[in-house]
Image: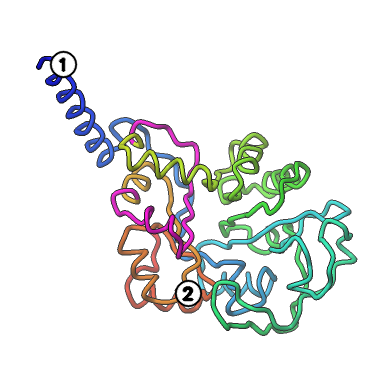
Amino acid sequence: MCAAVYVLSTVTGYVLTSALLLKCPNLLYRKKRETFLSKHISHRGGAGENLENTMAAFKHAVDIGTDMLELDCHLTKDEQVVVSHDTNLQRACGINANISDMTYAELPPYFCRLGVTFQRECFCEGGEDKRIPLLRDVFDAFPNTPVNIDIKVNNDTLIKKVSELIVKYDREHLTVWGNSSNQIVKKCYRENPHIPVLFSFPRVLQLLGLFYTGLLPFVPIKEQFLEIPMPSIITNLLMRKALFDHLTARGIQVYIWVLNDEEDFQRAFDLGATGVMTDFPTKLKDFMDRNGLSKAE
């Protein structure tokens, strides 16, 4: 009987403490410093309105007031950091070659017409700008715009050079980087712990386990940004307002990607997501303007 009472009281104490700290995490942790807040995020610069990852796409997104540019980085044969999504150039340029096997001068232009990855039967036709840009071009053109960098390959030189560019352009407070690979995220953090990192996929799974067992309020978190893909099975488990509220109270921003219709925009913001990543920055901006969401708080 005594043992049962002891177990019951211990479990009750744990549940109540977990619930309290889930609701009020600042009783245990100091909130992470947020140097920028991004509600409107342009995926690949807005791949549904301009050719993805081009300077034209980035300029259009910044001109309409995006809070953040999302882009992807690779390293060329002559060790130039370029902004492009695919490792191989076949889909975007029609050449069966890897970016890493070509110098920057050898890289071909993009096709005039590219499919939008996260929108079925949708194609984007670009204008004159079909060039694969350098990361430094983006930093030069948009010095005050936060940038979300997906390190596409596990390459120590790429990670080092991206870090060097971020430091050179004084952007440690305006950049977040990472990848779904936990190994890449760990390398990014070791290379420069002053640049905020994203949750890798294994860390997202760990986050889920901690949340549903009640342990999350007791565990320190080094990441500052959680990106949730939608739709997916994992998304259904992660889309919990209590989780979003807990993370944002700890200074961790929560982004949902890639959302391209207003119903999904509304659902994400209703659940407390910090921001939405989209291929259609104009559509998202119009939605946010109509619903009083445009001004970052």
- Mark 1 or mark 2, earlier in chain: 1
In the rendered view, would you say 106 is above or below 283? above
Q: Is residue 224 magenta?
A: yes
Direction from residue 220 to residue 266 in the image, left or right: left
Q: What's the residue at 42%, 78% (across, down)?
A: 286
Q: Nearer the viewer, residue 35 or 280?
A: 280
Direction from residue 147 to residue 10 in the image, left or right: left
Q: What's the residue at 71%, 51% (across, down)?
A: 153
In the rendered view, would you say 242 is above or below 269? above
Q: Is residue 64 magenta?
A: no
Direction from residue 94 to residue 265 in the image, left or right: left
> Quadrant of residue 160 in the image?
top right
Q: Nearer the viewer, residue 62 or 267?
A: 267
State the SS at label 2.
Answer: loop
> Quadrant of residue 150 in the image?
bottom right
The residue carrying mark 1 is: 3
Residue 33 on image: x %, y %: 44, 41
Q: Which mark is residue 260?
A: 2
Please state the extent of the stretch shown in magenta in the rendering: 217-243
In the rendered view, would you say 195 is above or below 142? above
Q: Within 10 Å of the Cα at label 2, are there few (<14), some (14-19), or many (20+) other Cα atoms?
A: some
In the rendered view, would you say 251 is above or below 98? above
Extreme residue toward the front, this view: 1
Circle 2: residue type: Asn
Calculate the distance from the C-alpha at mark 1 to the C-alpha at mark 2. 55 Å
State the SS at label 1.
Answer: helix
Circle 1: residue type: Ala
Q: Nearer the viewer, residue 96 or 293?
A: 96
Residue 222 on image: x %, y %: 49, 36
